[in-house]
Image (spheres, grey):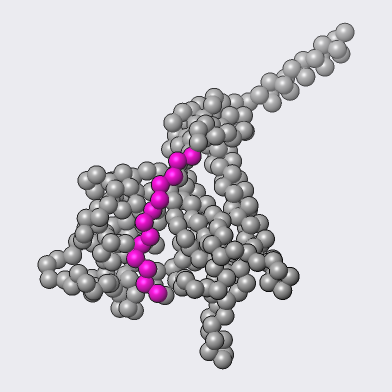
Amino acid sequence: MRLKLLVVGLAAAAALGGCQKVTKEQGTKAFYKELHLYFNNLNNEAQFRKDEMRKADAKLGIVTPTGSIYSTFVFDENAFIVKNFKCKTCETKLIITSPGTEYLCPSCGHCPYVTHGAGFNRKESPCKICMGTDGKPKEPNPALIAKEAFEKEPGAQVLPMFEFVQGKDNANATMAATVRYVRRQWAYDNRGVVDISSRVIEKAAVDPNYLPIAATAEGQLGRPPGFHRPDATFVGQIEFEFRGGDLSLKNRYQEEAVRPWKDLKGNQ
């Protein structure tokens, strides 16, 4: 009888030990991990679609239609997106998804973060203020594109990519968060009739195998099979719930198109 009670007691202790509460840090990290898995799965699907397009063989009569699209997704719980930021030169309202790589305003072609004094050449893009010594658009001063700088701009909305709406301090209850992401759409363009710039590689982590290759020894430009060009960019928003290790969508996603930034060949 004593042995039986001892076994029951040990079982109960083991059960209690297995029900330890999750800390706030553990719950938040688990939430982040599931969100990355979610977007990684979407990117893996895009990779599969790209690979299928590249299998097209004109000799066999299998041709991928020009303009066929796929999308890649970017999510970073530590990043932010800025809406309604006014260019300091032309005052056009912009959506900024990657302050560190977006240099020139899509409307006026000048750096939107810098105030231009009187007398500068508005038609020259980039002008001497926006251009570096190498002849390319100058990278903005980090202080001008920091989160704190955008928060001081009148009317600008600084939106984190991950924002708790429920359960921030109680990881053992249902946690919920608004998640914002960047979706880039790519179009199949096997002939490469639209040029693509080196900055695109940095912006979207594109597989170089899908980009136009450099000139050959004979001076001819080569295009790898399955070339894709950037077609459109969107900022999306979804609300997710996370409980007991399970991730679920609380509502449908909403997306807003982003105007393309000024593109200078080889610079942006």
The residue sitting at 33% across, 45% down in the picture is 158
Q: Position of residue 264 (x, y in %)?
A: 37, 72
Q: Is residue 140 visible?
A: no
Between 152 and 200, the one nearer to me in the picture = 200
Q: Position of residue 167 (x, y in %)?
A: 48, 28
Q: Position of residue 81 (x, y in %)?
A: 38, 48
Q: Residue 109, located in which quarter of the rendered image? A: bottom left
Between 19 and 143, the one nearer to me in the picture = 143
Return the residue found at the far front: 61
Q: Residue 61, located in which quarter of the rendered image? A: bottom right
Secondary structure predominantly adopted by residues drawn in magenta: loop
Return the residue found at the far top: 1
Q: Residue 88, located in which quarter of the rendered image? A: bottom left
Residue 214 sits inside the magenta stretch: no
Q: Is residue 14 visible?
A: yes
Decide: is 69 above or below 250.
below
Q: Position of residue 259 (x, y in %)?
A: 36, 56
Return the residue found at the far bottom: 218
The boundaries of the magenta stretch are 253-265
The residue sitting at 77% across, 19% down in the picture is 11
Between 144 and 128, the one nearer to me in the picture = 128
Decide: is 261 above or below 253.
below
Decide: is 103 above or below 163.
below
Between 122 and 225, the one nearer to me in the picture = 225
The residue sitting at 72% across, 21% down in the picture is 15
Residue 261 sits inside the magenta stretch: yes
The residue sitting at 68% across, 20% down in the picture is 16
Question: Could you tell me which quadrant the C terminus lies in?
Answer: bottom left
